[in-house]
């Protein structure tokens, strides 16, 4: 039998219930995201201007990068058409309010991401996804070279200009231009929020997007989909890729020290993206129901893959089994 939700002991009714969408919960998630982002930017600038705890500027940039990841996580929901019940509203909000603020074209992202689901960890997976876990050996020089590429913005540059990569159909040129204009409009609005202070705009918004965020995404990519490389197993099918997709910070396996749990949850696992295996198993389940799904399948899944639930993202990356 193919690896799917039925094998996990779930009925179609179970899935239907878990796939029920709530517009209210999505609105609350978006509002909380904007409020937390504005507060972090305000506090970061305040500390910087007053010279208060200025040595915390770099850690604050990673916290801001976590908000970038949170924007991406909610846009990710929309790519599966589960952010809002109305498809037009779902796409509009995702494009203008979630994608454009972090410089991502929603339509292009959706094509890539759905392709990622269809070919998880196989040779047909989009290059932008495979690149995140191309190197899993944390003892190698190449791993740290890639981390430096992330922090200096080179990795973001590669991703931004990889529209229409070889495994994903390239959108029409006119549509690319239109979407870039949308991003520019939204960035001008964000610059106005910074009171046209270009220095603060670059340091406290653009750099977290193109630097720390990319490093966190590399950590996340290796943790979620790098297991097969860590154990030197070639993935031949999407079923195998799914089975070797990991979840983190779950009730089945989590850190004893809550401070580490909350740190990873904030930096990477916002909006329950840490239940990543569950998401790949049932991609139409919204983030607020993923924990419920986990509780239903965890015992059955552990019997198939005892590596499916890792304590956290960083332990999964630095546990390297080579």
Image (cartoon, grey):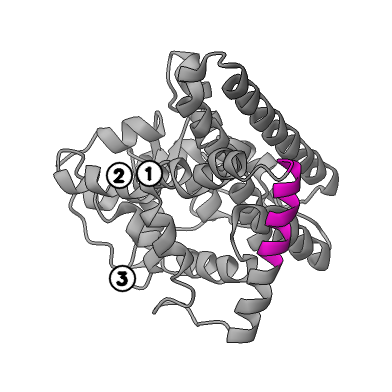
**In x, y percent, where is residue 200?**
60, 38
Depicted 113 relative to depicted 287: above or below: below
Q: Nearer the viewer, residue 73 or 173?
A: 173
Q: Is residue 183 magenta?
A: yes
Among the two numbered marks 1 and 3 on one chain, the one whose residue lies closer to the N terminus: 3
Q: Is residue 102 magenta?
A: no
Specify the label residue 137 is tagged with. Answer: none
Residue 211 appears anywhere in the view:
yes
| Mark 3: secondary structure | loop
| Mark 2: secondary structure | helix
Specify the label residue 151 is tagged with. Answer: 1
**In x, y percent, where is residue 303?**
37, 40
Instruction: Please give the name of the residue rendered at 66% of the width and 53% of the height, measured from the top-left corner.
Output: 101
Instruction: Please give the name of the residue rendered at 71% of the width and 38% of the height, measured from the top-left corner.
Output: 33
Mark 1: few/some/many CA within 10 Å (<14, 14-19, 20+): many
* In this view, the mark in front (3 or 2): 2
Mark 1 vs mark 3, CA separation in Å: 27 Å
**Quadrant where the image shows the N terminus:** bottom left
Look at the image and give the residue range highlighted in magenta: 182-195
* CB within 8 Å, label 1 to label 2: yes
Mark 2: few/some/many CA within 10 Å (<14, 14-19, 20+): some
| Mark 1: secondary structure | helix
Q: Nearer the viewer, residue 227 or 207?
A: 207
Q: Which residue is mark 2?
A: 148
**In x, y percent, where is residue 24?**
85, 43
* CB within 8 Å, label 3 to label 2: no
Mark 3 vs mark 2, CA separation in Å: 26 Å
Q: Which residue is mark 3?
A: 123
Q: Nearer the viewer, residue 150 or 216?
A: 150
Instruction: Please give the name of the residue rendered at 57% of the width and 82% of the height, measured from the top-left corner.
Output: 171
């Amino acid at each position: 039998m193919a690896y799917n939700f039925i094998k996990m002991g779930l009925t179609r009714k179970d899935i239907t219930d878990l796939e029920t969408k709530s517009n209210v919960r999505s609105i609350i998630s978006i509002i909380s995201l904007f409020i937390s982002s504005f507060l972090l930017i305000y506090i970061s600038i305040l500390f910087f201007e007053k010279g208060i705890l200025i040595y915390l500027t770099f850690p604050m940039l990673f916290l801001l990068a976590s908000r970038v990841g949170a924007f991406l996580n909610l846009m990710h929901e929309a790519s599966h058409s589960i952010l809002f019940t109305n498809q037009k509203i779902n796409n509009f909000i995702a494009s203008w309010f979630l994608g454009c603020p972090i410089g991502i074209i929603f339509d292009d992202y959706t094509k890539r991401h759905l392709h990622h689901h269809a070919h998880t960890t196989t040779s047909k997976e989009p290059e932008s996804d495979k690149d995140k876990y191309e190197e899993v050996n944390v003892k190698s020089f190449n791993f740290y070279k890639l981390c430096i590429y992330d922090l200096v913005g080179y990795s973001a540059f590669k991703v931004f200009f990889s529209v229409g990569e070889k495994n994903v159909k390239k959108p029409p040129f006119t549509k690319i231009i239109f979407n870039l204009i949308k991003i520019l409009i939204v960035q001008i609005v964000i610059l106005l929020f910074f009171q046209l202070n270009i220095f603060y705009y670059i340091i406290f918004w653009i750099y977290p997007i193109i630097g720390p965020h990319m490093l966190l995404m590399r950590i996340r990519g290796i943790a979620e989909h790098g297991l097969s490389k860590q154990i030197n197993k070639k993935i031949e099918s999407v079923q195998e890729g799914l089975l070797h997709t990991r979840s983190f910070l779950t009730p089945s396996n989590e850190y004893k020290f809550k401070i580490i749990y909350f740190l990873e949850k904030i930096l990477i696992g916002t909006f329950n993206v840490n239940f990543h295996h569950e998401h790949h198993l049932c991609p139409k389940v919204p983030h607020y129901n993923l924990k419920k799904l986990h509780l239903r399948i965890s015992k059955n899944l552990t019997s198939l893959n005892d590596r499916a639930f890792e304590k956290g993202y960083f332990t999964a990356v630095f546990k390297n089994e080579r």
